[in-house]
Every structure is written in C-alpha cells, then in structure tokens.
Amino acid sequence: MKWFWILLYNLIFYPVLFVFALFGSLFDKKIRKGMIGRISTVGVIKKYFKNRSINKIIYWFHSSSYGEYLQIEPVIRGVKEIEPETIILLSFSSPSGYDQVEAENIDCKIYLPFDFPWTIYRVFQIVNPRKMIFASYDIWPNWIWIGARNKIHTNVIAARIKDHSNKTKPVFRNIYRSIYGSMASIYTVTEKDHIRIRSLVGSGSSTIIRVLGDPRYDQVKTHADDYTRERVESLLDREKRLVTGSMHSEDEQIILNPLISYMLENNDLKVLWVPHEPSVSQIKRLIKLFQRSGLS
C-alpha cells in the first residue's frame, strides 16, 4: 500500500502542485522568489561542501518560515553547544524565513530543494546528513521516504494534529500514515497530539513518538528568566504595548474582536498587529477594519 501512495504522490499530486506553483509565481512575488531560490539550491549546496570534509557530522534542519524556525532554534543552539564541530544545514520553504534568519550557529542556509525524487537523490550524493529535523507541519513526503531508504534519521519536532485535521480523514489518513510511519521519531506538543499521531501511525510502526512540548515556549521562558527585578519594574512603568506577530486568518477570527473590545474599554493600550503575510492589500484591509471599529 505504501508504494501506491508513493506512486500517486509522484505521478499526480506533486506534479500538479508544482504546475500550480509555477503558475502562481507569475503573479505572486513571494512564490516566485521561493521558486527561484529552490532552483539554485543544489548549486549552493555543492559550492558549500566542495572543500569541506564529508566525514563531519551534519544535521539538516527544516522549517517553513520564521515562526517555525523559532521552534528549532533552541535545538540548533543545543546541538552546537554539545558538538561545536557539527555542520548545521538550515532550509526554508518561505522567503519570510530565509530572508529574516541570520545566526552564528547556522553554517549553510538554503531553500528546501524541490520534492522530486531525482533532485533529492542528487542532493544526498552531495551531503549525507546524520539527521533531518523538520519543524512542526512542513513535511515533504519524498524527503521522508527517501531519507528513510538512505538510513537517514528523520524526525519532526513540535508535531501537531489539529481538531478536524485532514490527516485524520479517510484517504488522507492512509497517505499520512505512510509518511509519519517512515520517520524515525516524532516529538509532539501535547498528549492529545501524541495520541492522534500514535493512532495515525498504528501500533505496528517502529517510529518513536514522545511528548516534548513546543520549544518556542521554552525559549520565551528562558528569555523571561533573564530579566532582573529592576527590568520588570521598569516595564511596569511604561505605556502598555501589545505586539501580535505573524497573525494568520485563524488567529484573526479568534482574537481580533475580543481585542478590539478590550482596546475600546482601555484607551491606554496600543496594539501592533502584524499579519503573517504583510502585503499592501492586507495592511489596507486591517487599517479599515480597525477604523470601522473606532480605532486608529
């Protein structure tokens, strides 16, 4: 059955997705930039590893965008502290992550190459990572399937399956079972996610599944612990500011109306609302929305 899903994905689903992405790149600057970045990725990898020892330990981390990078950044930092000679290869799907992330612990930054089998085999001929670590949800099937076949330890951290997710529905459930079941390990955010993924993968799988939480929360706590009492007291004396970053439409549906009501009742609160896609049209739409509510 697994081979059926592999063939279906490679002969129909991904080629169709690729054509749509090509078409979308004609009209969307962000999609176009990402496509161009992927085209050049193999060359970037070849150039970086040309004069470097192939015997060094390599960890390949992947995240969709900047928000997901924050989930793997503490892990990258921890790896470098324990094994400073390790090469950290970091890939992104979105320009919003690729353009914003610069860190001393990252040795090579790229766009994730296209999910075509021949592209992946070509990349693995150049670089043979000990592990591939995916952040949260941006999991590309061929990287998992071929990685497992090449005996590369593939795992995902901060894994989640939301209520009513397509991953739990008929047909979709089967293809996701073949993907998640090919991973070496999966680390979930909550116990509920653990139960759902365990049910999805099935009892016959050798995949290790554990609850480890969301590393982003650990990072926030670490930064918070660094604050001294004096800093906290100085913050309390400042004007109230609330910054909402990388807000999706789902966030807007839940948060925005209660937030507007609170702002109308508390005039001293100022809010900086940052949409996940800060396009001109999105900014204009949000400005009109706040203005109609009596806020400026």
Image (tube, rainbow, N blue to C red):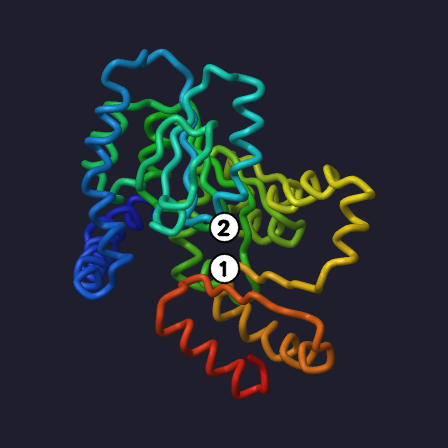
Cα–Cα span, label 1 and label 2: 7 Å
288 w.r.t. 212: above or below: below
**Which type of secondary structure does the marked residue at label 2 adopt?**
helix
Question: At x 48% / y 33%, what residue is drawn?
Answer: 184
Question: At x 38% / y 32%, what residue is drawn?
Answer: 148
Question: At x 49% / y 40%, what residue is drawn?
Answer: 156
Q: Residues within 10 Å of mark 2 (few under 14, many from 20)?
A: some
In which quadrant of the rendered image does the C terminus lie? bottom right
Q: Observer-nearest residue: 244 or 186?
A: 244
195 w.r.t. 20: above or below: above
Q: Observer-nearest residue: 128 or 184?
A: 128
Q: Amino acid at mark 2?
A: Gly
Find residue 157 and report its horizontal and vertical position in percent: 53, 41
Q: Is residue 204 visible?
A: no
> Is mark 1 in CB contact (under 8 Å) with mark 2?
yes
Left or right relative to 277: residue 224? right
Find residue 251 and report its horizontal and vertical position in percent: 55, 68
Pick whichever of labels 1 and 2 is earlier in the sequence. Answer: 2
10 w.r.t. 80: above or below: below
Q: Amino acid at mark 1?
A: Ser
Q: Is residue 69 visible?
A: yes
Classify residue 216 by image quadrant: top right
Residue linked to disc 1 = 246
Residue linked to disc 2 = 67
Question: At x 65% / y 54%, what residue is drawn?
Answer: 192
Q: Residues within 10 Å of mark 1 (few under 14, many from 20)?
A: some
**Which type of secondary structure does the marked residue at label 1 adopt?**
strand
